[in-house]
Image: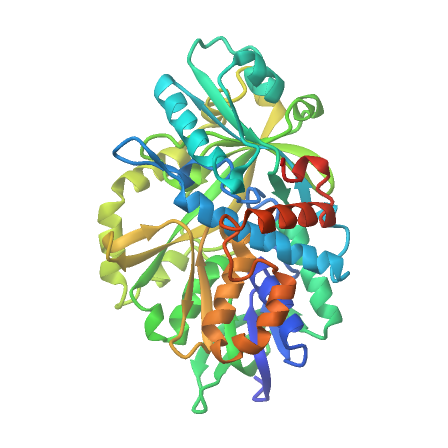
Amino acid sequence: MSNEETKTDVILIGAGIMSATLGAFLKELVPEWEIKVFEKLESAGEESSNEWNNAGTGHAALCELNYTVEKPDGSVDISKAIEINEQFQVSMQFWSYLVNNKLINNPQDFIMPLPHMSMVQGEQNVTFLKKRFEAMSNNPLFKGMEFSNDPGKLMEWIPLIMQDRSSKEAIAATKIDTGTDVNFGALTRMLFDHLKTKNVDINYKHSVDAIKRTNDGSWELKVKNVDSGNVERHTAKFVFIGGGGGSLHLLQKSGIPEGKHIGGFPVGGIFMVCKNPDVIEQHNAKVYGKAAVGAPPMSVPHLDTRYIDNKKSLLFGPFAGFSPKFLKTGSMLDLITSVKPNNVFTMLAAGGKNMSLTKYLIQQVMLSKEQRMEELRDFIPNAKSDDWDLVVAGQRVQVIKDTEAGGKGTLQFGTEVITAADGSIAALLGASPGASTAVHVMLEVINKCFPQHVKEWEEKIKEMIPSYGMSLMENPELLHEIHTSTAQTLGLSENLLDPS
């Protein structure tokens, strides 16, 4: 074991989209800071950020029905959709800045224009979708959204879904052409290639085994070289834990009070991937349906065109899977070792509250391929088993914590940043919309962890994100300007330009 200790300004744990984004930000704001990255796998973007481990939806809340809820009075609350759309616009601005400044190239390798659609069946759902459309299409963020319940029109939009549909059940869809498909794996790798040119010290196959506070307030990490078994010690003034599902264990090891009473529940995903080029060619959209009653939000069924390795593909899912691992490459003991004296009651309360989720996950795991095909046939009536293969997607760890609204052991769906009171360490937990809102989330980290610098950095942040500190919804002219410029910079062609 080496007793050598190296000091640095910033340590990023995990080489995923979050660390990549934070690293890119800090290198623009304070190029002189030294940054080290530790990743236990052999390259960047291999876990949650990998293109096969997430849906690649640029989550702009254009099609995801779980971001718009029907209130008891029948009206549709779109506030969550507005919030997520604004956050995605921030990502688009930052990516445009990187492309304009030649910090990354060839945006088409990570982002492609693609219509986002919501599709529902049954009178009640059609009524809901119409109300949702009326609430959203009046908002400048969702300009250009169309609604149709006309089978002829739907045949134009989604021929693969409408073909051979014998059901007389009411069906409707909304469509908006300003959606995107994002390859977060490719973007992560591009950002790490860029960070390498900025002298960021990136260490693959290095696992962070322990983390503790030193007397001078820095953090000391015990880092193991996965190949040689050698252990080194590294200290930094600021540590960001961006290790996907692995973040919870490291947060617990830090011992900060803010990390107590928090648990995690792992949920896996399985997608069906089409291998018939003729079928793939007939579909060109991300089409989101409605989650089954009792199903969690992350199981909303969707039929997605994807661009992976610059090749068009078609995926359907996700079917939920269950494994006690917190990462695809994690340990079967991850869940059990995450239960600590300070969160055991929170975890038990969550177990009691979420029996229906547990039952749902067990049912999902037990599904045969043919049963999964039956679910796919709700979308593609004539789908053939031979045309589809199963692919295991990434693991997501949903945050469990005590909240005022939900009480003890509430399961959170979303992305959360946990920060020490003094801002010296931050951890990212949770799941979707995750990667899509990485830029917004990292701005939150910067504001919470470096409040003493934010004033001097503000001008540079505004250069990177012109709408910083403003609501785009309340500034339609700025929104139009940003829509137009980001679409041009990111090569998203005419169909992504603001419809006005």
Residue 246 higher or lower than 385, as above or below: below
Q: Residue at x 42, y 12 (%)?
A: 169
Q: Is residue 37 above or below residue 303?
A: below
x, y (%) of residue 83?
Answer: 45, 49
Where's residue 27, x and y in %?
Answer: 66, 72
Q: Is residue 252 left or right of residue 340?
A: right
Choose top left, top right, bottom left or bottom right for residue 466.
bottom right
Residue at the image point whose x is 60% and y is 67% from the top = 461
The percent coordinates of residue 312 (x first, y second) are 70, 34
Q: Point out the image quarter for the N terminus.
A: bottom right
Q: Nearer the viewer, residue 27 or 9?
A: 27
Determine the residue positioned at 40% across, 74% down: 420
Point out the residue furthest to the bottom here: 215
Q: Nearer the viewer, residue 174 or 469?
A: 469
Residue 193 as seen in the image, left or right of residue 412: right
Q: How is the image coloured?
A: rainbow
Residue 135 in view: yes
Q: In the picture shown, does residue 189 fall above or below 224?
A: above
In the depicted structure, whether residue 129 falls above or below residue 230? above
The picture places residue 283, in percent across and down from the top left corner, at 64, 25
Q: Residue at x 60, y 38 (%)?
A: 179
Horizontally, is 123 left or right of 86 in the view?
A: left
Name the image quarter holding residue 213. Answer: bottom left
Say which of 5 and 90 sits in front: 90
Tell me, yes or no, if residue 48 can be seen here.
no
- Which quadrant: the C terminus? top right
Query: What is the total number of numbered labels drawn onto the structure image?
Result: 0
Q: Is 327 situated left or right of 482 in this image?
A: left
